[in-house]
Image (cartoon, grey):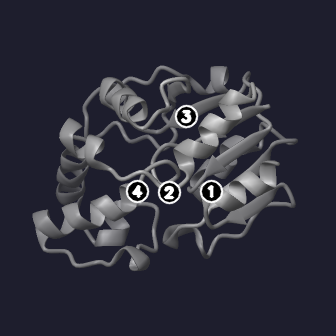
Amino acid sequence: MKFYVDFDDCLCETGRAFTGIAHSLFGKNVPYEDMRFFNLQDSFGLTADEYEQLMIEGHRPEVLLSFEEIPGACEVLNEWIDRGDEVSVITGRPYSTCDISRRWLEEHGLERVNLFFLNKYGRDSFIKNSIFNLELEDFYRMRFDYAIEDSPMAFRFFKHFPDMKVMLFDRPWNQGCELPNDNYTRCFDWKRIREMVG
């Protein structure tokens, strides 16, 4: 089987980390549970300049390396790889974070996963002239049996994979979203994801 796995907030606790960054930079006290928008500018009530500063700070190598693993994520991915499945981590991070993102994966035992950088959300404003190593047309030529994703904004990409099963990792910013069809299932942890895949 072939798996699409999002990086931030599926493998590591990015949203939780950004609540601390927003507080330290701007005094914004927004609890993780109150992050109602995938767009961090909206969740924290930031100006455009503040948002850019937040994203630059949040993408510093030492900050990216500090993100905590979501319990069970790496264990389950390695189980799939051990049985011969193909796991591709497809992130919206800019390619400039490649080395440090790969290092995070290696430090958490995921040196065998594929890693692709896809411009999912047009976030090249905070790191100027960002590049990505996977273009949409190439992404659409790939095949996946399952996807693990936290962002409803990614659903538009999944229309190109009508038979793919999507497991939406439950997060505060996606709790109000409507699942497009029966191929989508909300999952609260990696134990449930493991059970769904079998």
Q: Amino acid at mark 2?
A: Pro
Instruction: Give the alpha-carbon distance from disc 2 to disc 1, as whole Å.
Output: 7 Å
121 or 185, nearer to the observer: 185
Label 3 SS: strand
Quarter of the view holding residue 163: top right
Q: Earlier in the sequence, mark 1 or mark 3?
A: 3
Coordinates of residue 190 in the picture (x, y in percent): 62, 56
Check whether the beta carbons of the residues at disc 2 and disc 4 lie within 8 A of each other.
Answer: no
Q: Is residue 110 above or below residue 152?
A: above
Instruction: Give the alpha-carbon distance from disc 2 to disc 3, as whole Å.
Output: 19 Å
Q: Nearer the viewer, mark 2 or mark 4?
A: 2
Q: Report which residue position mark 1 lands on.
A: 190
Q: Is residue 56 left or right of residue 146?
A: left
Check whether the beta carbons of the residues at disc 2 and disc 1 lie within 8 A of each other.
Answer: yes
Quarter of the view holding residue 44: bottom left
Q: Nearer the viewer, mark 1 or mark 3?
A: 1
Q: Earlier in the sequence, mark 2 or mark 3?
A: 2
Q: Amino acid at mark 4?
A: Glu
Coordinates of residue 67 in the picture (x, y in percent): 32, 50
Q: Residue at x 30, y 59 (%)?
A: 17
Q: Report which residue position mark 2 lands on.
A: 71
Q: Amino acid at mark 1?
A: Trp
Instruction: Give the alpha-carbon distance from disc 4 to disc 1, as whole Å.
Output: 13 Å
Label 2 SS: loop
Q: Which mark is residue 90?
A: 3
